[in-house]
Amino acid sequence: MGLFQKLFKNKQQVAKRPAISSELNRLHKLDTHMTALLTGDHYVARSEYQDVIGSYHDLPDWFRVLKDSGTLGVFCDEHGTTSEEVNEILSRYDSFPALIESQNEQFVKAAMISEKEYLDEILKESDSDIVLDDDQRRVVLTDEDYCLVVAGAGAGKTTTVAAKVKYLVDRQGVDCILRRPAVGDAFASGRPALLNGRQHLQ
């Protein structure tokens, strides 16, 4: 076979390959983003996925139109994929917040075990009698953008937030510059809590 025939044959083979549509390309990018977030080994905060995943909000509707019209199979055949793969990605997209919540729950459970010794000692320098309970430890380990701590008087909210600040600095590498007059002001609900918070954080 001559060089021209080989080149022509290769060109024909390339021409027979299905072209990937922009929608299918976006679907694969969405799947890559979701997979990366669902296989990470850290707490996934909403800010980490909301904008990226939200940028694909129109995509499921586009594929549902194909599905409802009975043309999804034809589209998939023409573009070298399967309707099962498309449906699996769309299903994961629909349940993504619940999947992340489940993953975060597993992360916190595992971290409560792996960080037990650290959490046992987290505020011992300021008060050797402090022992965080399980709810306080969950607050410390939850790395969500916003974390509301609701509890009655004397339940340990100030202690929990002091432990959270220490965890963020020690384990998450968050830079924390605390001016003495302002220490505790952000989380203290009264003068005794303010003084207590300052003591824990010093």
Image: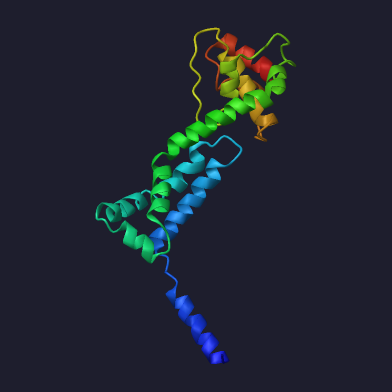
User: Above or below — where is 66 with respect to 187?
Assistant: below
Q: Report whether 110 appears left or right of 121.
A: left
- Nearer to the camera, 159 or 62: 62
Residue visible at 27% across and 54% down in the picture: 65
The location of residue 33, given as percent across then percent down, is 50, 49
The location of residue 52, given as percent across then percent down, is 46, 48
Q: Report whether 163 appears left or right of 63.
A: right
The location of residue 86, given as percent across then percent down, is 40, 52
Residue visible at 37% across and 60% down in the picture: 76
Residue visible at 51% across and 81% down in the picture: 10
Is any atom of residue 8 visible in this view? yes
Is any atom of residue 178 visible in this view? no
Residue visible at 63% across and 23% down in the picture: 112
The location of residue 85, given as percent across then percent down, is 43, 52
Query: Quarter of the image containing the N terminus?
Result: bottom right
Query: Quarter of the image containing the C terminus?
Result: top right
- Nearer to the camera, 63 or 116: 63
Count of picture labels: 0
Res. 127 image quadrant: top right
Q: Report whether 126 appears left or right of 45.
A: right
- Asked which colour scheme the image uses, the reply is rainbow
**Which residue sits furthest front?**
1
- Nearer to the camera, 139 or 42: 42
User: Above or below — where is 26 with respect to 179?
Assistant: below
